[in-house]
C-alpha cells in the first residue's frame, strides 16, 4: 500500500479585513484531522495482518503513467504475493509492458525477468523487514502493496498522516467493506477494509497529489490466509536458458 503512501499538507490562509487586521490563527475545525475511527481501522487491520504466518494475495492492478506531453495513460496488470513469516516470499508483478519475479528464501534475493531471460541474485538479510529496507536503499526497488508488510509495526508511518476519514460502506468482491480516505504529504490514498473479525484490505487506490496530472495506482485484492508453503516455494530455480547478470547497487 511503499512504499505503498505519502501525502498532501493542507494550507489555510485568512484574508485580513479592509480596515486592517492581523491574520487570525486557524481554528480547530480548519486543521487537518485524522478521525479516530479511521486510524483505529488501520491499527486493527495491521494487528490482524501480523497474526498471519503465511498469506497469498492475487491482485488486479491499474497503473497510470504520465507521458511527456502531460497525457495520462493506463496499464492493466496483476500482482501475485506468496509470503511466509519471517523470511520468505515470491512476488510476481506483471503489466502490459513487463514481468518481474522476486524470490526471497531467507538467504538470497533474486530478480528474474522471464521475458528477457535474465536474473540476478544477491545475498539477503535474515528477515523480510530487513530485506525491504536493503533493496530500497541499495537497489531502488519498491513493491506494489509493500506497506502490507509494515502496517501494525513501528515503521508503518501512521504519524505521517495529515487527514483520514471514514467514507462509508462499500461492496468489494462480493464482501462487505468500509471505505476510508487518507492523506500524507504528497499522496492521497483510499483503502477498503473488510468488515468483521478479519479486517483484510480488499482494495487500495493511491494518488500522487504532487503531480498535477494526479496519476493513480489501484489494486483489488483476493486473499488466501495461512496457506501451506514449503521452502521450495521460495527458492529460485533458473530456467535452463536463463542467464545470470550483475545488478547495479547504490
Image (spheres, grey):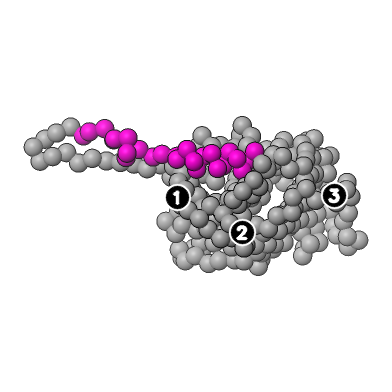
Circle 3 residue: 229
Examine the structure image and report whether residue 32 is included in the region drawn in magenta. yes
What element does badge 1 sit on?
loop
Residue 111 placement, left or right of 172: right
In this picture, which residue range is highlighted in magenta? 23-47
Residue 229 placement, left or right of 248: right
x, y percent for residue 85: 77, 40
Structural distance between the alpha carbons of marks 1 and 2: 33 Å
Number of the front mark, 3 or 2: 2
Q: Give the residue drawn at x 50%, y 55%.
A: 169
x, y percent for residue 155: 61, 34
| Quadrant in which the C terminus appears | top right
Residue 236 placement, left or right of 209: right
Number of the front mark, 1 or 3: 3
**For the residue carrying disc 2, how many other residues have a C-alpha within 10 Å: few (<14), some (14-19), or many (20+)?**
few
The number of numbered discs placed on residues in the rendered structure image is: 3
**For the residue carrying disc 1, how many other residues have a C-alpha within 10 Å: few (<14), some (14-19), or many (20+)?**
some
Nearer-N-terminus badge (1/3): 1
Q: Residue furthest front?
A: 196
Circle 1 residue: 210
Q: Quadrant of residue 151?
A: top right
Nearer-N-terminus badge (1/2): 2
Q: Which mark is residue 175?
A: 2
**Placement of 152 over or under 218, stated as above or below:** above
Main SS of residues in magenta: helix
**Placement of 111 over or under 185, stated as above or below:** below
x, y percent for residue 19: 8, 37
Examine the structure image and report whether residue 109 is included in the region drawn in magenta. no
Structural distance between the alpha carbons of marks 3 and 2: 26 Å
Q: Quadrant of residue 173?
A: bottom right
x, y percent for residue 133: 68, 38
Amino acid at each position: 500500500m511503499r512504499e505503498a503512501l505519502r501525502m498532501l499538507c493542507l494550507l489555510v490562509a485568512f484574508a485580513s479585513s479592509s480596515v486592517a487586521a492581523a491574520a487570525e490563527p486557524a481554528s480547530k475545525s480548519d486543521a487537518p484531522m485524522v478521525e479516530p475511527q479511521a486510524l483505529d481501522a488501520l491499527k486493527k487491520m495491521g494487528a490482524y495482518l501480523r497474526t498471519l504466518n503465511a498469506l497469498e494475495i492475487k491482485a488486479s492492478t491499474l497503473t497510470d503513467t504520465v507521458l511527456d506531453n502531460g497525457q495520462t495513460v493506463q496499464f492493466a496488470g496483476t500482482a501475485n504475493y506468496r509470503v511466509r513469516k519471517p523470511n520468505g516470499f515470491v512476488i510476481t508483478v506483471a503489466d502490459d509492458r513487463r514481468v518481474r519475479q522476486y524470490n526471497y528464501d531467507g538467504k538470497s534475493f533474486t530478480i528474474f525477468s522471464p521475458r528477457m531471460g535474465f536474473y540476478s541474485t544477491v545475498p539477503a538479510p535474515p528477515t523480510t523487514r530487513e530485506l525491504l529496507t536493503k533493496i530500497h536503499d541499495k537497489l531502488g526497488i519498491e513493491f506494489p502493496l509493500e506497506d502490507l508488510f509494515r502496517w501494525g509495526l513501528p515503521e508503518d508511518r501512521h504519524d505521517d498522516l495529515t487527514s483520514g476519514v471514514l467514507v462509508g460502506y462499500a461492496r468489494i468482491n462480493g464482501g462487505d467493506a468500509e471505505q476510508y480516505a487518507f492523506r500524507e504529504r504528497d499522496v492521497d490514498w483510499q483503502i477498503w477494509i473488510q468488515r468483521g473479525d478479519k479486517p483484510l484490505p480488499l482494495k487500495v487506490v493511491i494518488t500522487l497529489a504532487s503531480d498535477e496530472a494526479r496519476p493513480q495506482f489501484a489494486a483489488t485484492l483476493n486473499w488466501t490466509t495461512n496457506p501451506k508453503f514449503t521452502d521450495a516455494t521460495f527458492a529460485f530455480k533458473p530456467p535452463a536458458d536463463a542467464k545470470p547478470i550483475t545488478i547495479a547497487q547504490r
